[in-house]
Image (tube, helix red, strand yellow):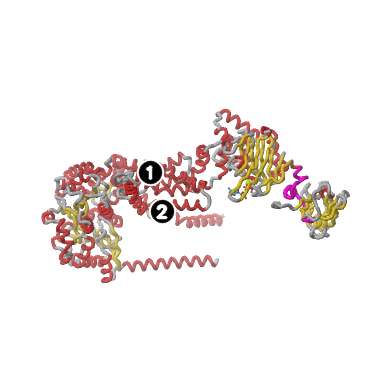
Amino acid sequence: MSKKHGALRGSLLGLTALAGMVMLGQTAQAEELRLLTWGGYVPDDVVAEFEAETGIDVEVTLSNNEEMISKLRATGGGGFDLAQPSQDRIASAQLEHNIYKPIDLSKIDASLFIPSMLEATKANTTLDGEVYGVPQIWGTDGLVLNTAEASTVKDYIDLCSDEVAGKVSYRLRRPTLIAFAFSMGMDPFAAYNDEAAYQEILDKVEAKLIECKPNVKTYWEGSDSLLNLIRSGEVVAAMAWDAGGWTLNNDNPDMNFVAPSSGALGWVDTFAIPRKAENEEAAYKWINFVMKPEIAARITAASSYYTASNGASSLLDEAQRKQFETSFPQEALDNINWYPPVPAGLEAIEGKTLDRVKAAQSN
Amino acid sequence: MTTSTGKAGAMRVGALLLAMPLLLWLFLLVILPHVDLLLVSLRERISYGKYEFSLINYIEFFVEPLYWNTYVRTAVMSLMATVLTLMIGFPVSYYIAKVMRGKGKNVLFLLCLIPFWVSELVRTFGWMILLRESGVISNFLQWAGIADGPIEMLYNDATIMVGLVYTSMLFMVVPLVSVLDSLDDSLIEAGYDLGGNAFTVTRDIVIPHAMPGIASGCIVVFMLTLGNYLTPNLLGGKDSLWFTEQIYTQFITRFNWESGSAFGFLLLVLSSLIVWIGLKLSRQTLSETVS
Amino acid sequence: MADQFDLECRDVVKKFDAFTAVDSISIAIPKGSFFSILGPSGCGKTTLLRMLAGFQAPTSGDILINGSSVLGVPPNRRPVNMVFQHLALFPMMNVAENVAYGLKRRGVDRSTIEKKVNDTLARVGLPDSGPKQISQLSGGQKQRIAIARCLVLEPAVLLLDEPLGALDLKLREHMKVELKQLQNEIGTTFVYITHDQSEALVMSDQVAVMNAGRFEQVGAPQDLYYSPQTAFVAGFVGESNRWKGTVGKTQGDQIVINLPTGGSVVASRVVHPELSEGQTVDVFVRPEAIAIDGQGKTDNAIGAKVENVLFNGAASSVQVRDSATGHEMTVALPQTGAFANLKAGDTVNLTWAAEQTRCFAKSEKQGAAA
Ligand SMILES: Nc1ncnc2c1ncn2[C@@H]1O[C@H](COP(=O)(O)OP(=O)(O)OP(=O)(O)O)[C@@H](O)[C@H]1O
Ligand SMILES: [Mg+2]
């Protein structure tokens, strides 16, 4: 009998202790920043410095555009204090799922941003007069080549040529559809708001991608696995982000990022605040911290991603600047196709196209 | 009279209280999500945040050959993987249960466990390192002079099958070993003594005895395979088509919860249906198999 | 000569690594006889039987069935069948399917199978049990089905490995008689192994007493009981009072065996011409050879005190203690019911003839006592 009481008391004690811990956890949460971001955007030393400076713990979750939206949608905009979607994916997601809250521009030091980029991002993420995103990092989709073996590849469409048969990789995602459309001489962005015209473009791209499928080694998913495929020589030409090409170039001068002749696709990843963020203050502190030129330059040095921070580029070292200039001569820079905001509903149509490409048998 | 009913009532309340955690668990984690899934699958997006009841997601599934093909392909491949796992797992289990003695038996059993010391992701990457064009086997074959150039062994259905069977083996071997362990050796000997040979003894005595284990192993393997995402996706490459992949795509990259839910429900129906047919064919009952 | 014997073993040896489980056994079992192998647990009975059935190969020696060697012949090709210790009926089949199993394996046609199965079930006294499941049978019925399953194949030899071991006492007594009768009717050679001496004695034409892998003695039950050849047989078959002693003086046709406790026992020189003075011997006297307050031969006479009356109907006995030496003895009570009111504490005079005393010189090898 007494033993039973003991056990009961024990478990009650345990429960109280647990409850106490949960409460402690909650109070501790006030000093935490939960960040939903991309791989490479938050180097460890930057996190450490921020934590030392502010006393706020940073909890990083790595993700991509679609997952970010899905995660926030599932919780109605909860679970994170700061997210980093691409600028073209914010307005439609906000309209559809209401997962963000407007950015309080008064809490952001606008002088830290390259003015043209800040204005463009603000314009693309404005809904009912409220701004939902400010830029952090930008980059392009283009060609990552092993130039020793794929010198003939000048544009996306060349990925389907016989010279590189079986040694090609790209993602089966919407940027690929857009890239092929441009390289086939069409302008998908102009057709964004005309569903029929867009469908027509997609149909042509679909036919091309199915025809091209035997050329493809595999559709890549994570950039690490793609870089491995290129390093091992299994893939010699791929459609990928510029930063990946530069990372490879650091080890092997034959491998590099090349801006395709139809133009690289320019994207900007932003800061956006989830609707149920619990520590907004920390989010603003983080934004103003990582946009400081010296911090932003460090991020670029570590990851090869370019930054929207004003004045950071002058702090980069010579080699990195040269890498950038080789890949982007002035005319290539002018030729970049920047993503306009994606109208809602477009992704559903694109999804069907991608499904059909995936389902087509290549052999 | 009143006291006795009162007592019985109290007892019933007590039993109910005891069962409460189980009922709560069943309700919150099993029934509620499925009801929710069903409801979501039965609506159609009209415009921003506006939905209406509709069967469009199910109609879509049957009209679009892509989904339908993926569904059938997943079912057929899962069945094949289950049968293959059984065909490999049965002799292995028989060997462990009936031929090995003492220490060797435990060692062999542990060997079957080893793949599970690492996560599925790591395991699948292990296969990729072995089978890729610049991988271990390809290099070995070239070194041995069997192949002239690099050989790509990844990204085809046979590789998916190998990965699925490898991943499922333990779930087949464990129930089979335990059911075969319970088979009295003298039954097998009696079979031989009465004139049976290896084939007839296996068919008439070993398999009927092992049937509950075969059924439960097959159910688990089939469900796991049907619901597998990583293995078909990573090992299958550009031509992998797996229904769970389709569900993931609908939910995560298309933001289309409605058709994702419908697909999820259809997958549930498919697995229940096939398990039911399997049980009927093998004349087993679910309760027998589970216990 | 070969065709009188269904089964013959020639110097059969079975070794498990260094351990010898069966040690050069030679035996010829006549056609149609009920042959038992009796021995304590672990003496190698099952091992021998499994070699006959073909589940194990002898390390050396030869086994002949119907006159030809069966070495290398697998169990499913030998004309012998085995009833297993735990019967090994197939639970996944009903009774008729169990019995039909062997015939099916031989490819016998359906109608013949049905007829034979029915005949055999009738012969073991369970004519209507065909559709029953094995789990619906009683212990004794299972027993009979296990035998029917073998008999339907008309084997030259039926091997039975302690088939009554799992049954309760009453049923065992009953089945003993039934098995004996069955064997009589069908005339198949039975090789029956058991560690229960009463089973062996009641049923068998011939019994081999086995100990530590060897046959100690082979003979009719009466021979074993009344003329055991070794101390092991004397001790293992039937009840005995036993002493250890030293051979003393011979007086006429009587030999005195001196017990270490001080007393002595008298044996007959006629029965034991081989004993010489000074030998160490084991001495055995059957409980029923001893008379209480009797008038018969009084070569041996002891005063004793009753310690326990073990009433068991016709097999009642008393435990007594020798007043002189303190040695404990068991004495059978006459079936007439005399001494029915004997009780603990009574003193009695015990007498027996010198011929009833059996002595075995302690030999090189001392088998495990029963
Ligand atoms: N496969 C084997 N490997 C090693 N030793 C064995 C093996 N089979 C039997 N033995 C040994 O041989 C001896 C005889 O065994 P066996 O089974 O023949 O005894 P048994 O006379 O049938 O005993 P019981 O009456 O208990 O059934 C035992 O000591 C046993 O340990
Ligand atoms: Mg035995």
Q: Quadrant of the N terminus of chain C?
A: top right
State the SS at label 1. Answer: helix
Q: Which residue is mark 1?
A: B78
Residue B172: percent from the left, percent from the top?
A: 44, 47
Task: Please identify the quarter of the rendering in which residue C186 is found.
Answer: top right
- Please name whichever residue, C304 or C9, is drawn nearer the observer in this view of the structure: C9
The chain containing the residue under callout 2 comes to B
Residue C28: percent from the left, percent from the top?
A: 68, 38
Whether C72 is drawn above or below C261: the answer is: above
Task: Name the side, left or right, on which C148 lies relative to A209.
Answer: right
- Please name whichever residue, C280 or A213, is drawn nearer the observer in this view of the structure: C280
Residue B27: percent from the left, percent from the top?
A: 41, 53
N-terminal of the pair, mark 1 or mark 2, is 1
- Please name whichever residue, A186 or C6, is drawn nearer the observer in this view of the structure: C6
Kind of residue at badge 1: Ser
Residue bounds of the magenta highlight: C223-246
Task: Please identify the quarter of the rendering in which residue C344 is found.
Answer: bottom right
The chain containing the residue under callout 1 comes to B
Q: Which residue is mark 2?
A: B116
